[in-house]
Amino acid sequence: MRKNWPVITLGLVLLAGLVAPFADRSTSPGFYVEVLLGGLMAGVLYSLVALGFALIFKASGVFNFAQGAMVLFAALAVARLAEQVPLWVAMLIAMVIMVALAWVIERLVLRPLVNQEGVALLMATLGVSYFLDGFGQTIWGSDIYKIELGIPKEPVMILESLFQGGILVNKEDFVAAIVATALVAALALFFQKTTTGRALRAVADDHQAAQSIGIPLNRIWVIVWSVAGFVALVAGVIWGSKLGVQFSLSQVALKALPVVILGGFTSVTGAVVGGLIIGVGEKMAEVFLGPVMVKAFDLAGGGIENWFAYVLALLFLLVRPEGLFGEKLIDRV
Amino acid sequence: MFYRENGQFKSTYESDQQMLPILQDRVFMLVLLVFAFGAVPFLVSDYLFLSLLIPFLILTIAAIGLNLLVGYCGQISLGHAAFMAVGAYAAYNLVLRVPQLNFLVVLLISGLIAAVVGLVFGIPSLRIKGLYLAVATLAAQFFMDWLFARVKWFTNYAHSGSVQTPPVELFGWTVNTPAEKYLFLLGLLIVFTLVAKNLVRSRIGREWMAMRDMDVAAEVIGIRPVYAKLTAFAVSSFYVGVAGALWGFVHLGSWEPLAFNLTLSLNLLFMIIIGGMGSLLGSYFGAAFIVMLPILLNQLPAMLGVPISTSMATHLELMIFGVLIVFFLIVEPHGLARLWAIGKEKLRLWPFPH
């Protein structure tokens, strides 16, 4: 109990943040719930990107800065292919491309760099992300493209009887949230129940031990990067249909980074929970805290959601350095 | 073959602690300095000064600063351009609000302000390590980007948020022409290099290196981690802050709110990776490489007679940049400085194998 006080304090602060909007009398509960839901749905999308990070870090100890570039690359591929063939064919072809990409990355970048320290690998993925940004735009073009998922975009009113004026929900967000949830569930099953999943977890635990009992390390890495490519594809399609496929899509990954450190690098659960916390926190801050700050400090516009997630994650790390669900590291001399 | 140090004995403590213990190295350095100060201003065109040498000199100061933190103390930072921004905006506001200050004093104060900010963002390093820290330093980047874009006081209520700087004046000398800028920056760079060199071979630098190599062991032998890590953050931010002020005043002249963005941070990091972590010489090489590469890539197609569109050129630049980074990491993880050392060693023995 005594040891947990920082976590409890932080939880209380977060709760206070959730309750604070009601200090202003004009906040209607309907609007509040709307913001909360919006935050949760944005959070699910962050989780999608964060999942890609967590998967690769868990299995190969590589912090994959290129995840954002992979999201952009996959989305571009789907968007451009869908102009020629039906959407599902485009997604299949894009998936094949992502697997090929995973194989190439493993072959050309990871294998020569095996046993290098984490920083060097991080740098290498930065190089990969530069390359993918350039390569993707060279072969697919650099305009803004659309992905049509065939989901109606107009918002619907729900719970009109419960709140005055009802709550506006975007149908597209709703579908995205369902897809993301399904994906997380599928990944959890894959990791827990299949032989490959078990091998992946073994590699994550200890490379050498896994290798010594006959798990082919290289193949596992290709699989992990392919899975990450798949996650990037899903995230790219959903984000792309929401925002349009363009270069700024690769910046979405930067939004997902605080999610990963908040949840803990190694944890799939952490990616999901962290995503929800960041999503809600960000929306709350943007809607309720932003105007207050603009008024108080005479700012040229809000935009605090650009850094809020990072500062939230940073404060959290001060309390729990390994993140919410990360493994605790013990130093030995 | 080319030079040997035979017969150069160290018989006093002074000669043992010299910065350049070998006579040939001293001569080489002297010739280089005479050439840089005496010959280059007359030989080089204004275009080369503005596009190559001036950015190179400023970015070298920044790279040395980042190298002190990442290469010597082992704390990764992905957000160092934020401290450049702090330095630049601090200098801008000092010149604007206290115009009678000497520019050197302005540089010093803006460096100190950047150091304080760096100290604050360095505090998490006491709790978190490695990749977590790398991501956490991004907080500095995004927060500072936002701060300088949104808080109007910093940009003196300019409408577009972009700021203009007056020319630099020093003791009645207006640093105006490219050659003058070059000489001013060269002088500063030499001072900063000497200070850094002496820092890393004195007590504090050794503490940083001990922290980098194994923090728990360093703590056991009596190095205070709080002190070592925070001084590294402060000194590094000071260097980078001064470089930021110079970047704004001497190189850019006027800049937009997002001039010091994440791309610049990553470029700084590439400089020390490609140049060599934990090597001052490497900072020079890395800065030169990163400054030259885009210019080369832009000129190359024209030289080869292959016309390509500008957007194509940007994409190609990104691709080649990415490939080069991965290539360097695979071929020589210790960077150009290590290649230089190997080359020197080879030349010393040449043409004999041993």
Image (cartoon, coloured by chain):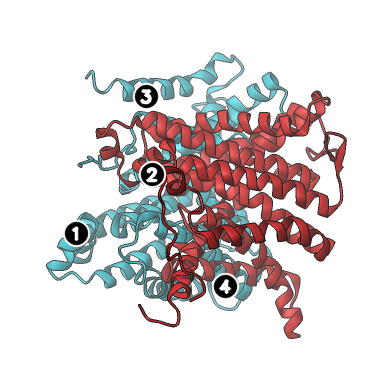
Chain colours: A cyan, B red
Label 3 close to label 4 by CB (< 8 Å) = no
Q: Is residue B252 left or right of residue A19?
A: right
Q: Is residue B255 left or right of residue B354?
A: right
Secondary structure found at label 4: loop
Q: Earlier in the sequence, mark 1 or mark 3?
A: 3
Mark 1 and mark 4 lie on one chain; the one further toward the N terminus is: 4
Mark 2 and mark 1: Cα distance apart in space = 34 Å
Look at the numbered disc 3 and give the secondary structure of its residue.
helix
Indicate which disc residue B209 carries: 2
What residue does disc 4 label?
A: A82
Alpha-carbon span between mark 2 and mark 4? 54 Å
Kind of residue at badge 4: Ala
Q: Which subunit holds the residue at mark 2?
A: B
Q: Position of residue B158 (x, y in %)?
A: 82, 33
Query: Which numbered dot is residue A11?
Result: 3
Q: Nearer the viewer, mark 3 or mark 2?
A: 2
Q: Are marks 3 and 2 on the same chain?
A: no
Dot 1 lies on which element? Answer: helix
- The Cα atoms of the two marked residues, 3 and 2, are separated by 38 Å
- x and y, in percent, of residue B113 in the image: 62, 29
- Disc 4 packing (10 Å; few <14; some 14–19; many ≥20): some
Residue type (three-letter) at the residue carrying disc 3: Gly
Q: Residues within 10 Å of mark 3 (few under 14, many from 20)?
A: few
Which residue is disc 1 drawn over? A202
Q: Quadrant of residue A151?
A: bottom right
